[in-house]
Amino acid sequence: MQLENSESSLLKETAHVQSAVAMPSLATLTPPQHLNMDIDKKAIGYSSGGNLKSRLQCKLSQSSNTEELCFEEMSQWSQSLERLLSSKYGMKIFQAFLKSEFSDENLEFWVVCEDYKKIKSSFRMSSRAKKIFKLYIQAEAPREINIDHKTREVIRTNMKVASAVCFEEAQNIVYGLMEKDSYPRFLKSDIYRTLLDSTSTPMRM
């Protein structure tokens, strides 16, 4: 029963991805604590075998939206992490994959830093920097990212006079971690391979 629930949850999320035809650009995403990264953390059953893969393909083929997600676009996601994150669909699907692996904090942090860099008001920037530090940087933070002590202390110093580059070093670190670890796993995952199989010919989105 638990496996069926996991499969059902993932299928629902796939339908949600299909309907996300107006995904904002990275530069305009809201802070991740408010992002609609709503895949159920129990939805990890998509790697459980061919039966779920067949159901996922069926769900994809039943989509009735008017947008098209084509094989050419999805195949380009394998060129680089940057290409994946620049895709309005790719970001959402990658989010879903990371969340199913309980490892979405790095992507959340990276996106919130992109949003942080756009702040013009020094007061708002200082306030946001403190929130980011408490949520992602400080030891045992609720969404603590994997950075070394030295980087954490550099950020603490930078926050005395908050600027657009306050979290740049940490952002580069987590991007590198995703590029070397999470991104290759995503490319080998059942969810990506199934979506590729389902879009070998243009799929209605």
Image (spheres, rainbow, N blue to C red):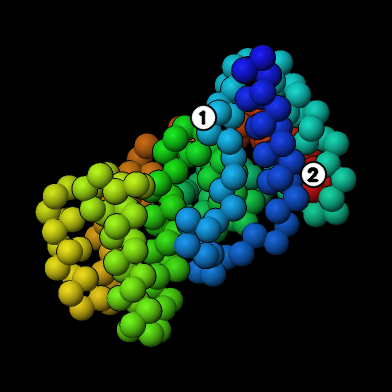
Contact (CB < 8 A) between labels 2 and 1?
no
Residue 125, compared with residue 185, is above or below; it is: below
Asked if residue 73 lies left or right of residue 99, the reply is: right
Task: Give coordinates of residue 200: x percent, y percent.
Answer: 74, 36
Amino acid type indicated by mark 2? Pro
Is any atom of residue 107 visible in this view? yes
Given residues 165 and 153, the one toward you in this image is 153
Query: Which kind of residue does numbered mark 1 sit on?
Result: Lys
How many residues crowd around disc 2 within 10 Å: few (fewer than 14), some, or many (20 or more)? few
In the drawing, does residue 140 fall left or right of residue 85? left
> Residue at 17% across / 47% down in the picture?
148
Residue at horizontal 28 percent and vertical 60 percent from the top = 133
- Image quadrant assignment for residue 192: top right
User: In the shown orientation, is residue 165 left or right of residue 106?
Assistant: left
Q: Position of residue 121 (x, y in %)?
A: 38, 85
Q: Earlier in the sequence, mark 2 or mark 1?
A: 1
Q: Which residue is mark 1?
A: 188
Q: Say which residue appears at 25% left-offset and 76% top-offset.
A: 162
Is residue 197 at all visible to an observer of this figure? no
Q: Which residue is nearer to you in this view: 185 or 9?
A: 9
Give the image quarter of residue 13: top right
> Tag 1: Cα neighbours inside 10 Å, few (<14), some, or many (≥20)?
few
Q: Which residue is mark 2?
A: 202
The one of 81 and 106 positioned closer to us in this rendering: 106
Q: Is residue 4 above or below residue 198?
A: above
Vertical relation: 171 (above or below) 98: below
Give percent across and percent down for residue 191. Answer: 61, 32
* Count of numbered circles on the image: 2
Residue ID at (18%, 56%): 152
